[in-house]
Image: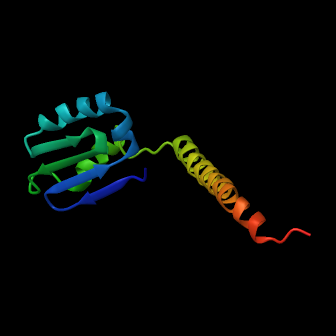
Amino acid sequence: MATYIHKTAQRLRIRSEYILQHPNEVHALIEQLNAIEAVETVSHKRYAGSVAITFDGTEISADDLLETVESHGWLRSEEKSAFVENAVKSGSKTLVKGVAVMALKQLMGPVLSRAMPFA
């Protein structure tokens, strides 16, 4: 999963692999963020790996919040996982192609042998 960041003057939304895979650590920081007066709401969608923070833009900036979550690893991506994910995708495509060719041979084999005249 690629890290996604969307920030406005009063809202910051982050979606990342770290948020998806480390819910306890994310929850701990969310509690700390909720203690900040300028932070109005924090919405965590655990299974989407997403956190949205709304805040008073006159007291704190999106960049300040982004720096905080970055220091806690929320923007980190695990390259090993991306490698495994790509390998699984590639292997799945190869497997599907192989199964499709086998099915086509089984389906078309008898048809082709009946169509060819025997000598």
- The quadrant of the picture occupied by the C terminus is bottom right
The image position of residue 78, as x and y in percent, is 49, 42
Q: What x and y, as percent, mark residue 85?
A: 53, 46
Q: Taking 73 as reference, is 109 above or below it? A: below
Q: Between residues 59 and 65, which one lies in front from this camera angle?
A: 65
Residue 73 seen in the figure: no
Residue lying at 27% horizontally and 38% vertically, measured from the top left: 46
Q: Residue furthest right?
A: 119
- In-image side of 19 versus 62 (left or right): right
Q: Is residue 117 above or below residue 63?
A: below
Question: In this view of the protein, can residue 23 be seen by the observer?
Answer: yes
Residue at left offset 15%, top offset 43%: 42
Point out residue 114 in the picture as x, y percentages from the top left corner. 75, 66
Seen at 75% across and 71% down, the residue is 115
Judge by depth and name the residue closer to the eye, 48 or 15: 48
Taking 88 as reference, is 97 above or below it?
Answer: below
Q: Nearer the viewer, residue 20 or 58?
A: 20
In the image, 76 versus 80, the foreground residue is 80
Q: Which residue appears at 10% of the width and 44% of the height?
A: 41
- Count numbered badges in the picture: 0
Q: Is residue 15 left or right of residue 61?
A: right
Q: In the rendered view, does 105 fall on the left or right side of 1?
A: right
Rendering coords of residue 37 (x, y %)? 7, 41
Left or right: where does residue 10 sit relative to residue 25?
left
